Amino acid sequence: MNQVFEKPSTDQIWEWLDAVPDPEIPVISLVDLGIIRGVEWQDDTLVVSVTPTYSGCPATAIINLDIETALRDRGIDKIQLKTQISPAWTTDWMSQKGRAKLEDYGIAPPQAAGGPERCPNCQSKNVTRVSQFGSTPCKAHWRCQDCLEPFDYFKCI
Amino acid sequence: MAATLTQDEALFQFLLRMGDNTLILGHRVSEWCGHAPVLEEDIALANTALDLIGQTQMWLGLAGEVQGAGKSADDLAFLRDVWDFRNVLLVEVPNEDFGRTLMRQFLFDAWHSIQLGHLMKSSDPRIAAIAAKTSKEVAYHLERSADTVVGLGDGTEESHGFMQAALDYLWPYVGEMFTSDAVDAAMVDAGIAPDPAALRSDYDALILRVLGDATLTVPDSRFAHKGGRTGAMHTEHLGHLLTHMQWLQRAYPGASW
């Protein structure tokens, strides 16, 4: 009770969370994805607000577990995870760093125009949609007409 | 019922209607997983089912909260029987073939997107938040189902035939989405949800445009099978669906992952 717990700053916590990878697209972090909506201390409890990407995304439970594990590893015991559905998640919240990493990894980042700007493999703009859905709820399936490689496109929502 | 319906009871019924629609359709669509005509369609159907089941967690989660009997979304999904479900009959009819599945999806998506557009302005902030979240997913569902209905309707003679047969079969199930009762009246009074009947003109405009592009003929009848959203009478299909969906919880009560 009298022991003084040195609370890490929220900036420090944001930095730690920026090192937690998305379970399905591990090249980007949860912070890059824009789903961490708030980090604050309420007395000695750390409250982290998380917003789901898609309502039925099966990664949501794993994401919560990963956040808790990462923070416990840093010595934080009292953690409260809050699901915040409003305002609804949008790919506009994805960081520039995250977008660049996605493209490097071979996933075309979301575009307001509704389709990929270019092929993430050969940069050709000659691309076509194979399917509106892909391997995860957040992606669609596209193909490059020049290098003929299929690729994932992160849907703009 | 109308005379004694409290505001919370009406709200509970309304939330069941929203959540049971997405639950039953989500389960139906998930039946295609591993069986669709091509891999891309299989993935698309499974993703749509996943969205709908995720949305169900929010609607039935809130329903459980409003009911105040300590029930979770899972309790409501797995431990109620046919007569307690409040989904429209449209979503419980069997998949039959790919054409009927996509036509059913389109007829539902069109209503769903219009309904959610209104619910985003609900006086209940919890409902407005769920609507804002789910309407983005539903806009995507509608885009896909409308495109597919046009592609298959205005496709080959064979695909056109399947889509016309699907529309003829499903058309009598459309009207139920626009019927109003005491629950709806209570929702309208409280500014929580729109009167279902008031959505019909927007709906007709949307579907007539798409079905026209699909070169399909809308049956000239307003006859409607009803009873799902009030719980008065479901089709025989719902019971069969529930035996599959609820089997695990019935056989092993309380089992969890």
Image: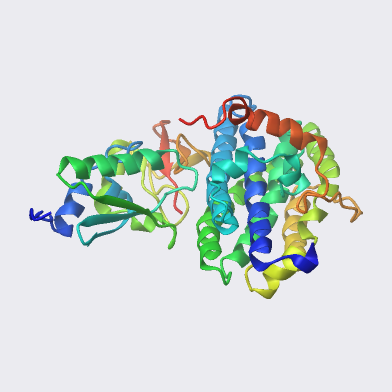
Image height check: is A86 above or below A63?
Answer: below
Residue B33 left/right relative to A42 = right
Q: Locate residue B1, reporting x and y percent.
A: 79, 62
Count of marks overlaid on the render: 0
Depth check: give the residue in front, B241 or B50: B241
Q: Considering only vertical position in the picture, is B194 above or below B59?
A: below
Q: In the drawing, does residue A88 fall left or right of residue B117?
A: left
In-front residue for pair B42/B236: B236
Q: Against A68, is B204 above or below?
A: below
Outermost residue, front side: A1
Q: Position of residue B43 (x, y in %)?
A: 54, 33
Q: Answer with the quarter of the image where residue B119 lies.
A: bottom right
Q: Residue at x 59, y 28 (%)?
A: B33
> Residue B145 is drawn in which quadrant?
top right
Residue appearing at x 78%, y 54% in the figure: B230
**Residue B251 image point, x, y percent:** 61, 25
- The vertical placement of B16 against A65, above or below, is below
Residues B55 and A139: in front is B55
Front in this rendered view, residue A152 or A89: A89
The answer to whether residue B114 shows anywhere in this view is no
Q: Quadrant of the C terminus of chain B?
A: top left
